Amino acid sequence: MSRKHVLQGAQNVSISGGTFIAADSVKYYTSAGNRATSDAAIPVKPNSSIRFTGRTNVLAKLKEHFTAESNDKLRRRKFFLLYGMGGIGKTQICLRFIEDMSDCFSHVFWIDASSADNITQGLKGICNLPEAQSSVLDGTPQSALWWISSLGDNYAMVFDNADNLTPEELEQYFPSGLGGNILITSRNSGLKHLTLHENSLEVKEMEENDAISLLLKAACLDESQEDLQAEASKIVNELFYIPLAIDQAGAFIAFGDTDIRDYLKEYSQYREKLLNYPAFKGASTYNRTVYQTWELSYKEIQQRAKSDDSQRAEAASSAMLLLAMFSFFHFDAISEEIFSYAATQTHETNGDNEQISALPLASSVIDHTLLQLDETGKWDNYIFKEGLRVLLSFSLIKLGSLKGVYAVHPLIHAWGRDRMSSEDKEKYSLMAYGMLACSLSEYFNEPYQFRRILVTHLRANMQHSVLAKKKMVERYFDDAHEKFGSLLSEQGYYSEAEKFRIQVLDARSRTLGEEHLGTISAMGHLADTYEVLGKYAEAEMLQVKVLDLRNRLLGEEDPNTIATMSNLANTFDCLGKYADAEKLQIKALDLHNKYLGKEHPHTISSMSNLANIYHSLGKYADAEELQVKILDLRNRLLGEEHPDTIGGMNNLANTYECLGKYADAEKLQIKVLDLKNKYLGKEHPDTIGTMSNLAIAYNRLGKYADGEKLQVKVLDLTQRLLGEEHPDTIIAMSNLATTTDTLGKYADAEKLKIKVLDLQNKYLGKEHPNTIVAMSNLAITYISLEKYADAEMLQIKVLDLQCKHLGKEHPDTIGAMNNLAAIYHRLGKYADAEKLEIIVLDLQNKYLGKEHPNTIIAMSGLASTYSSLEKYADAEKLQIEVLDLQSKYLGTEHPYTIDAMNNLAAIYYRLGKYADTEKLQMKVLDLENRLLGEEDPKTINAMENLANTYLRLEQYPDTEKLQIKVLDLRNRLLGEEHPDTIEVMENLAITFYYLSKYTDAARLQVQVVDVRKKTFGEEHPKTIQAVAILAEITSRIEPKKKSHHLSNIASKFSKIFKRKVLHYSNVSHIVISDLDFQ
């Protein structure tokens, strides 16, 4: 077999060593001195960029495809298509592939396929190759194709940038026969018809690491420097990993126009100039910037719009209109439904707005070309589809993951706006805004998921629109503003909804008058928004006005009047006016039942509102009964996945929690969270609220780490999405602080709770229920920090306010009494604590029943006080009952059950039943170790308690071993000067004393005395105690006092030792208040 020489050609031709025929040498041919049979020049194939980076997966796919052995007896031609948007690097990939495979093809022909003329010129140029001239070609494209087809099986032909040709038009330029290999690059994925689907690949954005490497290469910077990589990462992310844009950015930085650290600042101000600057074309083979690359496609569409072929022109015009509007939607999830709904809505509602005919409507600013209906009254989408087909063929848009959904690359999306004049920006942003408005019906009959997508487009339109800079006041459209106010509110964007609704009320009040029904409706909607924003006083004022107007103009029995009653009752509830709320809501429910029927959505909503008020009043059983009924109705009438049904589940779960049915609550909350994640998205306020509620359920079940993890996430989301001063953010902060407290992170909890109280005082007022809860929660943290005076002062204030606003028998008032009793206990005011705790227990028994968790907590608190009053028999009896109830209803491994065991063990200790104490404490320690881990504060407390019992049992080595472990853990986790660390240090010093290790004991006790003096001062009882213990230990070191009997210290400090071992689980008898999201 004869060997062919290699022509390393350029633009049209590259001939290299044979694919299956080895070449000993490579010869390069140029056109100089050769007899030409055509005037066409031999184009030069460019080399790939020296900065070419990555794309290993695409190159591997190409190599695999073109080198794979065929199963056919006759080798068949291999085709492959690389398609994708302009600037994505298709040409560079092909160039690198050809270079890497230089020994695999007998000949390579590189054709610029950007137009039929360019292909023709390229083929003519091939006729001028020396090897071709020997075949006596006539210089026509057909003779070139004939010659190529005669070369055998191993030639490769690349059609680069075949963007503007149809498959049929391009196929005319394929050589005849079955041999050869053809590689095509195009923006038009429709060319897959030539290659088959499996032999095509979309070229997508670069991998991040490759993109960073490309940028640093282009910028002539050191790729090994981590700080530069970090800056580069931000830039490539902003450029969405498009190689041409990244290469341009690198060139700009390399020229010294800006430092890499300042590029994004420049880019944010001058994006259009940077992406369109002629001096920085990067690695574009065709000498174009990234914006020029897309502009070329747009100009081709413009040319088609001028075509004499009316269908071709109509499709191009449709494409330009769609691209312009898409630029003012969000770049992702652009649904055909927007146009479909808009078409039917505009035809149905035109002329149907007599009520507000004096106000401008959105339909007046949209182009109706795309919104025609067919004979059956359905949307005629032919022109729309034709426009999409044109945009898809240039990869200016791409298909989404769902049918009828499209996306625009973010940079093309930006280019679409940047290329417009200010007049066009205003025109198309307004048209897009109007289109979105017209796609919504007055009563939101469209699927919820559609509305979820639509709000994303609306918010993008508001952000991108030139009208946003004018606050959209100068171009007011009544129907659009009303719909969008409702849409934004429904989707949880309350602050944005407020702005729209204020504008609607102002416009209607001015134009229609205050007593016009449309104006009254706007007042009611704004009041609803004020309520969810926590602006309760403003909401109340507006709702009272709306109720008065509707009573007078429509009558009490009108559905709108009844709805207003229900809304006002909800606001009363939020303001803590529970009696007024209950009275008004019962009236609203009776009227709804009477005039609308029991299964009407408004009646069910009224029932739900009444259940919420029962909840606030502590009537949990009544709330549960109503909410079970509501959930059954909504499941049957709406289905399980409807937002109202999910809301019903959420409310019932909260009531289960208040009733102590924690497992039921957890199960429901997990289900609710899954559904909300699926249908609302992870960042919707309702989803975040459910996350918070689930975290609370986890805490109730003792899953504190899970609870804390969720609540940190909730706080991050609310701060980012709603702002720090939003009621839901404050609630998230409060709930996280409560969990932090439970985990023993008292300083962190205090800091958070003070912030919460300040915010509640500022935005809700000093006597608002949530403010009172914040006070109570802060008092609890003060207890943990041993700031008993501060705790007592705050808790007395809380109790006074609860009695004043809720009455003495309200659950929250009872909880305040219980917490004050706990503080009295810590202060040693046991008689005062006992008196309060007896009242609390009687009330809990009366209103909640003996088996309610809060009643059991009250029993545990009273048992603790009995013990402190040395009423050990009463304490033992009550605490055994507590443990039995906790075990029965919560299980033996629930944290509250373990706390009950621990407290009973402490009572046994007081009674001198050390064997029983040891047995229970060993069980407690085993459970805490297994469930919480060795480093949990409660586990460490359990170790210390058991150590002190060992001390009483004179098991000194066991005592020493455990106390050393406790001291090591507290030193590491809490610090050397933490009160709990000093406490165990002193206990260990005493154990060393009993073991006659007087030097070790003295060393530790000196540290205890120093820290106590520093922390409490010299006259504090704890300091005096520490000094006395040190004196006794020191006396043992002196020889003349070695005869002193050990009983001296035991007698002298017996009360101290008793206090040390009495480690009650205080959380068991303190009520900590969590807050639910609205």
Image (spheres, rainbow, N blue to C red):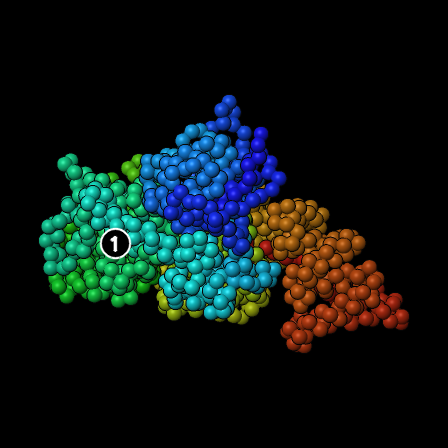
Q: Nearer the viewer, residue 845 or 739?
A: 739
Task: Indicate left or right for 790 with 314 as reference.
Answer: right
Q: Residue at x 29, y 50 (%)?
A: 300
- Relative to 1019, does residue 753 appear above or below in the rendering? above
Whether residue 1008 is visible to the viewer of this picture, yes or no, is yes
Whether residue 371 is visible to the viewer of this picture, yes or no, is no
Q: Residue at x 41, y 48 (%)?
A: 41
Image quadrant containing the C terminus: bottom left
Task: Indicate left or right for 511 with 212 as reference.
Answer: left
Q: Nearer the viewer, residue 361 or 1022?
A: 361
Q: Residue at x 46, y 43 (%)?
A: 129
Q: How many marks?
A: 1
Query: Circle 1 sits on which residue?
Result: 432
Secondary structure beneath disc 1?
Answer: helix
Q: Position of residue 794 (x, y in %)?
A: 47, 68
- Direction right: furthest residue: 1039
Q: Position of residue 271 (x, y in %)?
A: 39, 63
Q: Position of residue 1049 (x, y in %)?
A: 77, 65
- Relative to 331, does residue 145 appear above or below in the rendering? above
Q: Amino acid at mark 1?
A: Ala
Q: Residue at x 30, y 42 (%)?
A: 389
Residue 432, quarter of picture: bottom left
Q: Position of residue 363 (x, y in %)?
A: 17, 53
- Relative to 196, does residue 88 appear above or below in the rendering? below
Q: Nearer the viewer, residue 468 or 15?
A: 15
Image quadrant containing the N terminus: top right
- Direction bottom: furthest residue: 1018
- Relative to 6, does residue 1006 appear above or below in the rendering? below
Task: Indicate left or right for 997 with 493 as reference.
Answer: right
Q: Nearer the viewer, residue 37 or 360?
A: 37
Callout 1 crowding tier (Cα within 10 Å): few <14, some 14–19, many ≥20: many
